[in-house]
Amino acid sequence: MTVYNINLGIGWASSGVEYAQLYRAQLLRKCEQTIKFVFLDFIKNENIQTLTENIGFKDDEIIWLYQYFTDIKIAPTSVTIEEITSQLHAEVTKIEDKGKVRRIYYNSDHNYINCHLKNEDSDIVDRVEYISRGKLIRRDYYSYVRILSEYYAPEDNAAKLYMRTFYNEDGSIAYNEYVNEDESMFVFKDKVLYTKQDFITYFLEKLNLTEEDLLIVDRSKDIGQTVVQNKGAARLGIVIHAEHYNQTATNDSNILWNNYYEYVFMNAHEIDFFITATDIQNQLLAEQFEKYYHKYPKIYTIPVGSLSTLVKPEQRKPYSIITASRLANEKHVDWLVKAVVKAKETIPEITFDVYGEGGQKRLLKDLIKENNAEEYIQLQGHVNLSQVYKDYELFLSGSTSEGFGLTLMEAIGSGLGMIGFDVNYGNPTFIKDEQNGYLIPINLNEQKESEIVNHIADGIVRYFEQDTHRFNEVSYEIAEKFTQPVIAQKWKKLISEVLYD
């Protein structure tokens, strides 16, 4: 029996979906389940192993669609510059060091290669670009051997990709991909596949899925139909990671589903189970299926995260506040900064640390400077927060939509008080109004930003005027429901019921 978890891509800045998969991996390992995490996108520039290891996956848990049809294993990059230059069969005439890129000239400087290094201070090569008379002609990708080559031809003064060749360990060709803009054709010795969907279908067929296998799809947009039609005897589940419908476009007679889930919802009879991260979303989704379609699909609540332990501090820094998120517009960290500035007028001891990276970093820096708040509001960047939360008293969330909220869970796991908006689904799961913090009412259509900021500031002041120890204890009580043994038991129950009941 194998649990296959299907995703599209992965990068350095992984989303909540990838972190949800990592938490799942940790729990299913404890349940002694065989697990595979399948990535269907073409991964550019990096060895996929570098990305999956970075987030915490094990090499033998990873299946990359494009590498699956070769005998090359998922493994760290180990090919060196010396190995690359030995294959040139030409005299090296000059070497230029450009940080993570080593440019090596040969054949009287008419030709050169760009060796893109895994790390700036090493000689391990991720990929190599072959340049001839100023034109890119080939790009090779490596792990412990060459994985694939891309071939380019000049078109409109640019290099146009027209073919990829994928290799086996011994250098023989496993298959070719012929590329035309956004379309691809895949040619094997005994088969030609004319689309990417055909390629995915062929992959699913090769898995030889049985009724003992589980397929869990984390991103179903564009691949939902292909997976449903080719799952074989396997049991199929869909994870709901975000808001699943458009509230403003929904009325008593019609519902507008989120287009990421529309196909699987409209074909719910083909899906063995759905998974939501919270009971609130589970209940709402079930009510909507009954109301609009008279259907009663099996829906499980399994949080996308879990806590390995509850973290207790020796002492929290008084009047300290933290938030952690992507620094993106929808997270509204700017509102939090403005609210802290206002609350500071009443409680001068307040400090606020912002953890995370993103496109709004410059805006936030400028906002902090404009308010002369550099001494008490700090941007701390992206760090491992597992042992950081416990040093703070209060966690702020400015998001107006959270399907779950991993940082919210992590914060209550360290007993922090919480302030966030009264919006589905994560905030009311982790914030019990007046018990471990405050849920702030919000109506974006009617409230001005200044009014919203004032409400947050009032909540901060109210919080620090209370005995905060009682808030801490309630947060720990809520957190108990999200510990690894509790969530692992939910997975065991799902697997048992889906496969054997």
Image (cartoon, rainbow, N blue to C red):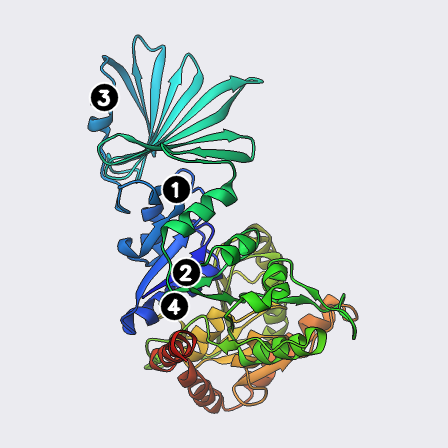
Q: Please, what secondary structure does the residue beneath circle 3 have?
A: loop
**Pair 2/3: label in front:** 2
Q: Please, what secondary structure does the residue beneath circle 2 have?
A: strand
Question: What is the three-letter code of the residue carrying label 1?
Answer: Tyr
- Report the disc number at residue 24: 4
- Report the disc number at residue 119: none
Could you say where residue 412 lies in the image, as x and y percent from the top left?
Answer: 45, 79
The vertical placement of 199 against 278, above or below, is above
Examine the image and state in which quarter residue 462 appears: bottom right
**Pair 2/4: label in front:** 2
- Whole-number angstrom distance, CA of label 4 to CA of label 3: 43 Å
Along the polypeptide, which appears first: circle 4 or circle 3? 4
Along the polypeptide, which appears first: circle 2 or circle 4? 2
Q: Please, what secondary structure does the residue beneath circle 1 have?
A: helix
Question: What is the three-letter code of the residue carrying label 2?
Answer: Asn
Q: Residues within 10 Å of mark 2 (few under 14, many from 20)?
A: many
Tell me the residue that label 2 is attached to: 5
Are dots 2 and 4 in contact, CB under 8 Å? Answer: yes
Question: What is the three-letter code of the residue carrying label 3?
Answer: Gln
- Whole-number angstrom distance, CA of label 2 to CA of label 3: 39 Å
Q: Residue at x 43, y 71 (%)?
A: 305
- Residue 41 visible in rendering: no
Along the polypeptide, which appears first: circle 4 or circle 1? 4
Could you say where residue 395 lies in the image, as x and y percent from the top left?
Answer: 50, 74
The vertical placement of 83 against 314, above or below, is above
**Pair 3/1: label in front:** 1
- Residue 57 visible in rendering: yes
Tell me the residue that label 3 is attached to: 87
